[in-house]
Image (cartoon, rainbow, N blue to C red):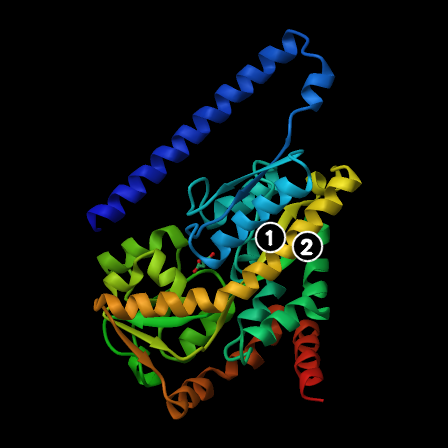
Amino acid sequence: MSTTKAADRAARAATRHAGARVQLVFAGAFAALLALGLPFAAQAQQPIVIKFSHVTTSDTPKGKGAEKFKELAEKYTGGKVKVEVYPNSQLYNDKEEIEALQLGAVQMLAPSTAKFAPLGAKEFEALDLPFLFANDDEYTRISKGPVGQWLFQKLVPKGITGLAFWDNGFHMVSANRPLIAPADFQGLKFRISGSKIADQYFRLMGGLPQILAFSEVYQALQTGVVDGCENTPSNYLTQKFYEVQKHVSAANHAHLQYAVIVNTKFWTGLPADIRGQLDQAMNEATDYTNSIARKENEDAMAAIEGSGKTTIHVLTEPQRQAWKTKMMPAYDWAKGRVGKEVLDLLSKAMDTKTN
Ligand code: SIN
């Protein structure tokens, strides 16, 4: 691991432990105040705190979206709500943050749709199908329509409320050898984030997919635990994956999107006027995030290219077609994983565009 990366990890671990200590101290102080009979009015003046945990750095589309939500939420509620954003797996990694949301230790997350199976909502993985979206606009249109609403309904029995879908553009794939033809994937171990759909398309290409938390990817690539991975340019740049991968291929083979979710008990327990103000903040933060995702990724791609540390291969149309042909059986396979209903809804939404 590079010294900077090691220092980052150490700092993060220290922050986590410090955070846990602060929580304990805070809990103790709160109990003491209650024992002293602190008047309820004084307690009521305390702002409502929303802890928003996520795993990317602050200078990514998701990181900037979370900061925008904080800014707008605090503004529209006149300071009655305070949003604390914890980026870069500072509090929790992928799996932990879902558990923390269910337990109420944090109130808001924005995991990628690839990570919803542990919540009992594997239908979200339908959005990870290969070559599904032609571009970011198509993704935004579909996620804001009936497909997005249907997916959010799946969260209701789990005590989770879906607020918005956020964009982070298209995945690239990397390894220490060029990945141009499907045969180049043969026998390589690829880190995936959780989706069985991704598991399937990597297997169809001859790769060996393996689930790892996002916070563990850099080290896994560096030490050879895995040979390659997929992610968006903004994540390659900010997590420094490009420093430990000699070749990156851009084929737009799959899309990375997030669902912003809250704990329902917390959300419905908020005063209606505050919830309305937060809804407004979330709608605007969503438009903002989706509007910057493409440029953020283009800039990240240019920075990676400029670093000279890796070679980027932008696939030609025939090369993309060869990947597509190889990955297409994932659609048939997906019926048994996400169910036919969401696949039908998706294909209907896609047809609407062409009618
Ligand atoms: C993220 O962008 O939230 C991380 C995605 C991943 O785990 O690959």
Q: Which mark is residue 119?
A: 1
Rendered position, 226 above or below 5: below
Disc count in the image? 2
Could one spot residue 4 in this view of the protein? yes
Determine the residue positioned at 51% across, 42% down: 85
Amino acid type of disc 1? Leu
Q: Where on the image, by quarter, is ligand 1?
A: bottom left
**Where is residue 183, by image quadrant?**
bottom left
Residue 159, visible in the rendered structure: no
* CB-based contact (under 8 Å), mark 1 and mark 2: yes
Q: Is residue 238 left or right of residue 351?
A: left
Quarter location, residue 344: bottom right
Identity of the residue furthest to the right in this view: 272
Image quadrant containing the C terminus? bottom right
Q: Which mark is residue 162?
A: none
SS assignment at label 1: helix
What residue appears at the point 24 percent right and 47 percent down from the top-left corner? 4
